Every structure is written in C-alpha cells, then in structure tokens.
Amino acid sequence: MNEKTVRESRVTVSQVMQPADANPAGNVHGGTIMKIIDNAAGVVAFRHSRHNSVTASVDQINFHHPAFIGDLLTVKASLNLVGKTSMEIGARVESENLLTGIFAAKNQK
C-alpha cells in the first residue's frame, strides 16, 4: 500500500440544516450532527485505507452551541493516528448562520 499523508485523506462536508434535522423549536438534533460527523470520518478512513471500515467507538462529543434550521453545518475531519488495524479520526464542527454570517464552533476533538 502506498503511503498517504493526512492532507490526502482529510475531508470537509457541508450541509444546510433542514426542518427534518431539528425539533419543533428549530434546534438541530445532536444525533443529526453525530451522523454527519460519522459519515465524514468514514470518508477519511476509506480515502486512507481504500477499504470499508466501521466506527468502533467515539471518545467524546461536546456540543458547545446549538445549531438551528437554516444554519450551514461544516464538518472537517482528518486522521489523528493510524495503526495496523485501526485509525483515530478527529472532527471539528462549525455552523454558520447564513443570514448573519456568524460562525460558531460546535465541537472540537
């Protein structure tokens, strides 16, 4: 297998939050955000290994600020560590209020 750099495997995913992603008050569900993080991490793992992978565990997720319907959620994921049979992938989540242009960090690992 050819050696790859972290840069070659990293990914950025953006998605506008819709009413189906949120509760009746307009707050985006944490599970929706976690799914986007997991999808981004899966792409990083596949880009690096060129094989299917599964999420074995999640160390920690802290939600520092809420995301709302209409926000642009952006997940930046990249490799932290690569072993013989596993990888650790970190993700940073930000949201942008598209009406005001204000950014907020949602989590950082």
Image (tube, helix red, strand yellow):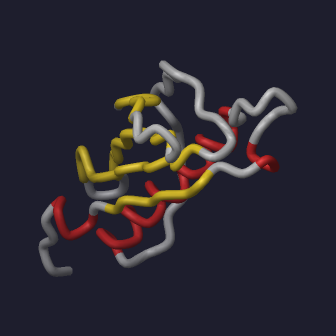
Q: Position of residue 48 (x, y in %)?
A: 29, 69
Which residue is at 46% across, 41% downward? 96
The reply, left or right, for residue 63 in relation to residue 94 is right
Looking at the image, is 67 positioned above or below residue 85? above
Q: Name the quarter where the C terminus is drawn.
A: top left
Q: Position of residue 106 (x, y in %)?
A: 46, 30
Q: Position of residue 36 (x, y in %)?
A: 57, 52
The reply, left or right, for residue 62 in relation to residue 18 is left
Q: Residue furthest right?
A: 24
Please tell me which residue lies in front, 45 or 14: 14
Looking at the image, is 23 positioned above or below residue 38? above
Which residue is at 37% across, 78% downward? 50
Which residue is at 52% across, 49% downward? 72
Please tell me which residue lies in front, 48 or 98: 98
Q: Is residue 93 something one can see in this rendering?
A: no
Instruction: Tell me which corner region of the image, top left, top right, bottom left or bottom right, holds residue 92.
Output: top left
Q: Position of residue 18 (x, y in %)?
A: 72, 51
Q: Name the quarter where the N terminus is drawn.
A: bottom left
Please tell me how many numbered marks the rendered image carries.
0
Please tell me which residue lies in front, 44 or 97: 97
Looking at the image, is 57 positioned above or below residue 35? above
Q: Is residue 61 something one can see in this rendering?
A: yes
Which residue is at 50% across, 35% downward? 58
The reply, left or right, for residue 12 in relation to residue 81 is right
